[in-house]
Image (cartoon, helix red, strand yellow):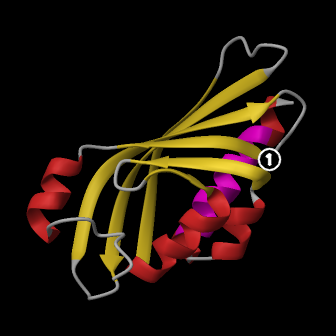
Amino acid sequence: MHQRQLDTVRHYLTQLQAGNTAAMIDAFEVDGLVHSPFLGEMAARDFFPRLAQASRQSVITVHDLFFTVQPTEEMARAAAYFRYDWTLADGRVVSFNCVDLFEFHAGSDRIDRMHIVYDTHPLRERVGGNVLDDR
């Protein structure tokens, strides 16, 4: 089963780079959640349109993919460690290393929850405030 879940993670990262909002949302369970350092916890269906609005282009360079050694009967986890070269809607470019942590219900290849982990200080210092603000 874990191969299908890792395939989902790979597909998600490919769609993140492509900016394919619908495909990213489709990689999640209907009630899937994203926990973002900037926006807190949001439904995936709400988060990805906000990301698209704030973005012009993304380049994803995957360093490593990890999968839970011993998934439980209820949950399996995977992680993607990657460099994110992100061109914001206004043309500014920010680059940082990131880890996305993915949780799957056992037996499902759709993401239940994703936690985005990175140091926000350099990003906030460079572009200021909340880059995902929809003002």
Amino acid type, callout 1: Arg
Residue at horizontal 26%, vertical 62%? 95
Q: Residue 132 versus residue 66: which sits nearer the camera?
A: 132
Q: Choose top left, top right, bottom left or bottom right for residue 132.
A: bottom left
Main SS type for the magenta part?
Answer: helix
In x, y percent, where is residue 72?
77, 13
The residue identified by callout 1 is: 110
Name the image quarter holding the N terminus. top right
Q: How many marks?
A: 1
**Residue 62 versus residue 57 in the image, above or below:** above
Residue at horizontal 63%, vertical 56%? 43
Q: Residue 81 versus residue 44: which sits nearer the camera?
A: 44
Residue farthest to the bottom, as pictured: 90
Specify whether 73 is left or right of 113: right
SS at mark 1 in the image: loop
Residue 55 seen in the figure: no
Residue farthest to the front, as pictured: 135
In x, y percent, where is residue 39?
40, 56
Residue at horizontal 11%, vertical 66%? 126
Specify whether 26 is left or right of 35: right
In x, y percent, where is residue 16?
56, 66
Q: Residue 111 versus residue 45: which sits nearer the camera?
A: 45
Name the image quarter holding the C terminus. bottom left
**Residue 80 versus residue 34 in the image, above or below:** above
Indicate yes or no whether the magenta region holds residue 10: yes
Range of the magenta residues?
5-16
**Residue 56 versus residue 65 in the image, above or below:** below
Residue at horizontal 32%, vertical 79%? 88
